[in-house]
Amino acid sequence: MPLTWRLMMLIGRLLVLPLCRLRVTGNIPEPLQGRALILAANHISPFDPIVMTAACHIAGIGPRIMATGGLFDAPIAGPAMRAAGHIRVDRGKDTAADALPAAVQALTDGAMVLVYPEGRIGLDPWMWPERGKTGVARMAAMSGAPVLPVAQWGAHAVLPYEAPTHMLRWILRALRHRPVVHVRFGDTPIDLTTVTGTPGAQAMKATRLIMEGIDATLAQLRDGEMEQPRIADPTRPADYTRVRPRPGRELPARPTVKPGESTTSPTRLT
């Protein structure tokens, strides 16, 4: 693991300490330790990368992260991201396709890679993972690496969707309340052995299974708030085009309350 990445993880843990109470549960299953592995996580807040960096430090792992190209262009973060060996993803650009072979090569070399299958901060009104992109499924098929689901919950109570807008306001609020943030590593890799069909069909089916695996892991962190989060993020827009059904529930109708609100009156970030 590059020294720069070790330092970044330590800094991430120090940054998280005053802003929230981080709870990390689950472990990388022993058969998967020290080998190529894809960590597929949900994405709910701009604070997620820092949370995951700290969680990885606690878990004793150092995955290479697939991150938006903007981070690599930043004056300080950019050189650090490159020195740490992270993988650039230029979403919406011609160079976006370069991320997949780079990730596959990292996995072929035996690395662990962390990726957000949604490809953005999810905009599901209920804050469940939205429909994923097929990149993770293709990475798994091309490299043969297993996919382990990772769930995180509560980071939106630290930094909401609109951050870095009003950043000082949100940081002061987090310092005052120190909300609990959870990260859970899944118990078992997602079984993709049943996926058959054409390459395109396989990628779609595998993506569905991956998102369902993240759902199942996240459900363990959302006890008592399965339909609506207790803490609402009023800055988060709702996008119904990528809402997906979850096991045991049909595709939901649009809620009669505003996104982030519910009849149980969730706490709103202010």
Image: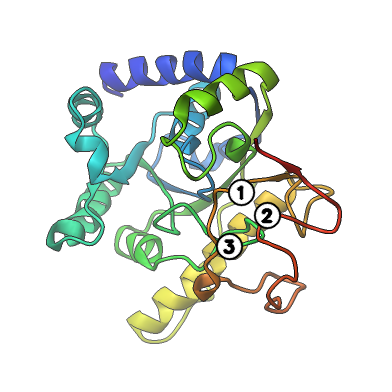
Q: Secondary structure at mark 1?
A: loop
Q: Secondary structure at mark 3?
A: loop
Is residue 219 shown left or right of residue 139?
A: right
Compared with 207, 53 (above or below) is: above
Compared with 17, 186 (above or below) is: below
Q: Residues within 10 Å of mark 2 (few under 14, many from 20)?
A: many
Provide the residue designation for mark 1: 234
Specify the amino acid type for callout 1.
Pro
Q: Residues within 10 Å of mark 3 (few under 14, many from 20)?
A: many
Q: Where residue 79 appears, x then y in whole percent?
A: 17, 26
Q: Which mark is in front, 3 or 1?
A: 1
Q: Please name the residue shown 68% across and 62% down the image.
A: 258
Image quadrant assignment for residue 156: top right
Dot placed on the residue nearer the N-terminal end, 3 or 2: 3
Provide the residue designation for mark 2: 260
Q: Please name the residue shown 24% across and 57% down the image.
A: 100
